[in-house]
Amino acid sequence: MSVPRIYKILTFLTAIPLLVSACGAPQLDESAMSTAVALTVEAQLFPEGEPVSPSPAPTNSPIPLASLPAATATGTSVPQVSSGNCTASASLVGETYPDGTIVQPGETFTKVWQVLNSGTCTWDSSWQLIYHSGDLMDGLTVYNFPQPAQPGQTVDVPVILKAPAEHGAYTGEWMLKSPWGQSFGVGQYSVPMSVSIVVGSSTPENRRTETVFGVTAVTYEVERTCAPANTFYTITANLTTNGPVDVTFTWAQSDGNNKRNNRLSFTEASTKSSVREWSQHKDSSPNQRWAQVIVTSPTYQEFTQVVLPDLCPSE
């Protein structure tokens, strides 16, 4: 195997200073020697005199938003380009086909969420409704927003779906997505929006008037107990439903110590209670404290917060 050409060149160049010194020739300074070496290597690597193009200097110029590909309803999303100029946030204020609505097997229906733009961004067709989890029900995975919404405005967000052929309960979850790739839901905890149907064989006349059961009211009772070093709160939430339903909810607190996935099962329209304990040391911050029940199933509902009494006075 022959020695690579570049190896020969470097060997030859390494010997040049020795030969020059041995023959008593004038000494080249380091700069001149480096230039000679560079020119010799270039001549050997490019014997035909091809020019050596300098590498372009890297740039940090931002990509213009207008040059980014538009989102489509085929699952392609806009590249993540964070504007950093506004906050994306939404609240659910209404919906058609509420959870538990009975539909016929194979029936096509349009689910519509009335969504409040509770952030500081302006929504347009570059914002999206995206499939999150559960039963897709013959829908697409991505829908562009149908109309713009300024902060504080409400917009109807529809999705056309088809009920499965088999009887049973089906639920799909959907999220919103900003042009820079941020997915978010609705409410304080940014939960997905859901479509939950029951595929059955009821008549068209009956199924449209079918009662959808859920939580209709939440009331609170608060008891404060004083101890030498602590204040103890016992918070009772009374949840009332309009019929038989399984309810999942979150205990939310102002200190962020939330308790999720609490469950109550109702066999009829009635009221059931859930108790939450909360203790505070006497040296804790005197800031106002509150607790809240947020129902996450069968329908997302944020109920009024209850403000707790002040800490017990120090003895």
Image: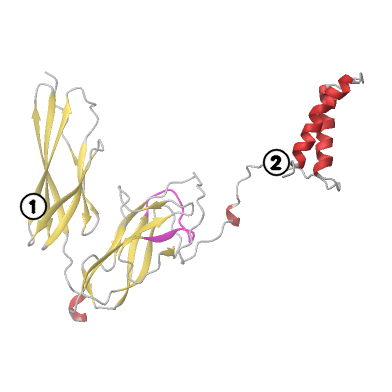
- Residue at left offset 18%, top offset 79%: 201
Residue 293 position in % (x across, y down):
19, 47
Task: Name the residue beneath numbered marker 1.
Answer: 272
Dot 2 or dot 1, earlier in sequence: 2
Left-right relation of 221 to 193: left
> Is 260 or 280 nearer to us in this picture?
260
Q: In the figure, 153 relative to 58: above or below?
A: below
Label 2 environment density (alpha carbons within 10 Å; few <14, some 14–19, many ≥20)? few
- Residue at left offset 20%, top offset 41%: 291
Return the mark for residue 57: 2
Task: Classify the position of the C terminus by image quarter.
Answer: top left
Magenta residues? Answer: 117-131
Q: In the figure, 309 relative to 269: above or below?
A: above
Return the residue found at the far front: 1
Magenta span main SS: loop
Specify the quadrant of the image occupied by residue 164: bottom left
Callout 1 secondary element: strand
Label 1 environment density (alpha carbons within 10 Å; few <14, some 14–19, many ≥20)? some
- Residue at left offset 84%, top offset 41%: 43
Callout 2 secondary element: loop
